[in-house]
Amino acid sequence: MLVRKIFSWIFSRGALPYWCILLVDCMIVMLSGLVSFYIIYDGLTLLQNFQRIVLGLSVCLIVYIFSFLVFHTFRGVMRYSSFVDLHRLAYSTCLAGFGVCLLHQVQVHLGLTRYIIIPRFESAFVMFIIATMLMWALRVLVKSLHDNLRSSIPLQRVFIYGCLQGGVALAKSIQTETPARYTLSGFISPDEQLSGTWLMGVKVYDDDDDVVRKMQSCHVGTLFVSPIQSERFTRRTSLIDKLISAGIKILMMPPAEEWDGKSDFSHTRLHSVEIEELLPRDKIEVDMKSIGRMLCGKSILITGAAGSIGSELSRQVARFSPSNLVLIDQAETPMHDERLYMSRNFKELNVKTIVGSITNEEQMEKIFDEYRPEYVFHAAAYKHVPMMEDNPGMAVQNNVYGTRVIADLSVKYGAKKFVMVSTDKAVNPTNVMGCSKRICEIYCQSLNAKLREDEKREGRADVGCQFITTRFGNVLGSNGSVIPIFKEQIRNGGPVMVTHPDIIRYFMLIPEACKLVLEAGTMGKGGEIFVFDMGEPVRIVDLAKRMIQLSGASNVEIKFSGLRDGEKLYEEVLNDAEHSKPTVHPKIKVASVREYPYDLALSNEKELYDLSTSFDDMAIVKKMKEIVPEFKSRQSKYEVLDGEREEK
């Protein structure tokens, strides 16, 4: 402890002034000169000419001091010395060595050898080498002592997953942190050629499951994941499971952030992982320039703007500087939160936050008339399957009728594109919510076809509103999704309730899903139903187990409650009778679906809406099944309607 306090004082800002560093460097120069004479000649010659040699070295010292001043070698903080400082030091001693050689020629030319001895070329060169090495060694020693003694708390040993750009950037960030919290103990490299090598003074280990045992033997409790390797790391599920089981903390970059692999990167941007960051996923790239060209300076309207998808869409769209950003939602408190966020982060934008329902046709028309949106992103919907199973009338009024209101107003007020957020539950629907979204898809697609036919028949060159639908599965962390529910259950000590041991779901991060919505809106020409590649499905029971392990909680049980009304064991993205075509984006495909005539789609919607006002659940769902014949109820009271339909 005493030694630590002494060194802490020595390394403090005022304890080691610049002149002390200069004095030590001068002493090194004098010592280097004497050693060089001893090496080139011998000890006897050095003793016999000691006074003249010291006088000559004193003159040489003036040259060295001048060179130190030129390159500011003594003004750096020694405890933070870097390769740049070492380079600068070498340049200064090289310049000084050249100056010493010139002084020697002057001494010889003036015949001053009997009074003063200045090193000639051989001695000056050896003096340059020794002085440089000793001054380098001093700075490296001071930095090492500082790095080892700068923290009053025990340092946490860490491994870094990934080498080269991202890994080295993290390692440098660790080494320069003050006060120190971590010490680097090793790298893990997916590149087999680097396995067994040494980097920055520590060993590089192979990317295999046995590396967890090696980390434990080195008493390593933390793993930093290079942002460049995060995609590969999330696919190493067996390694992740062993790390979690071993109690090793995993730190990664938040998924919404990006790093170019070149700019400065700090480990302070990493955070303890959430379960959603450990699910296998591919990095999603979108054409941000095309999206920017489409949205910049335009009037944009987003419905459901306070929801999980709508709020993220709003934030991503805001980055492209639209002329107007009109946000609509009927949830007052979340809308207020969104209003505060926009006022803090996008002060220069003209953002309108409006509390209202998409089913209020008069209010919606007033909004369209005032702001004339050119692009409409329709994310408003009732989405919870069990709730809509019990309230089919509201599912029809909000999801179906509300979509028709916004779609018709988009046509009336000249919007260029209408992008609707749909769901994989619209494919072979087994519940009211999924069927309601399929009916929305049918109406939008038929309306788009009607507009194109009218333009062709009337010979109009201008293209009216283009209707585009996007389908994807569950988004991680959205309101009501399993992850926040499981977190709450774990905090309460369990049990964690899973509906079925075999149930699987596709998951996507909210920011990634919204990027694909914008990309689909850019590439869509009207009438398409875009489906997103959701990656690999995840067993919900495995998700629950990993969340329990990550939490560190013990004795938390998993119980199975049985499938809920209308719930599937697995979700589909395409109907059995459908097929998909690729697009320029590898994550986006176009579904070929059965199309409906506009007149039929409209009459079906009107009849369904009239039924919804009766709140006769059976009558409403029966009509929905007529509109969407593939709608087969599961775990629901409406299964009897399927039996009646089969009998007919």
Image (spheres, helix red, strand yellow):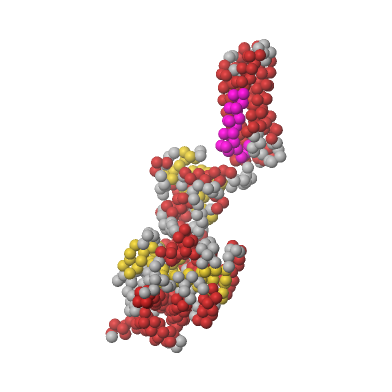
Q: What is the quadrant of the N terminus in the image?
A: top right
In this view, the residue in front, 593 or 645, is 593
The quarter of the displayed image where residue 588 is located: bottom left
Q: Is residue 258 magenta?
A: no
Q: Is residue 88 magenta?
A: yes
Residue plotted at (65% across, 12% down): 111
Tell me the magenta residue range: 78-99
Q: What is the quadrant of the C terminus in the image?
A: bottom left
- Residue 569: x and y in percent read 37, 70
- Residue 83: x and y in percent read 56, 37
In this view, the residue in front, 188 or 533, is 533
The answer to whether residue 66 is seen in the rendering is: yes
> Is 641 placed above or below 206 here?
below
In this view, the residue in front, 39 or 286, is 286
> Is 465 placed above or below 9 here?
below
> Is 102 placed above or below 588 here?
above
Residue plotted at (69% across, 35% down): 18
Q: Is residue 191 left or right of residue 322?
A: left
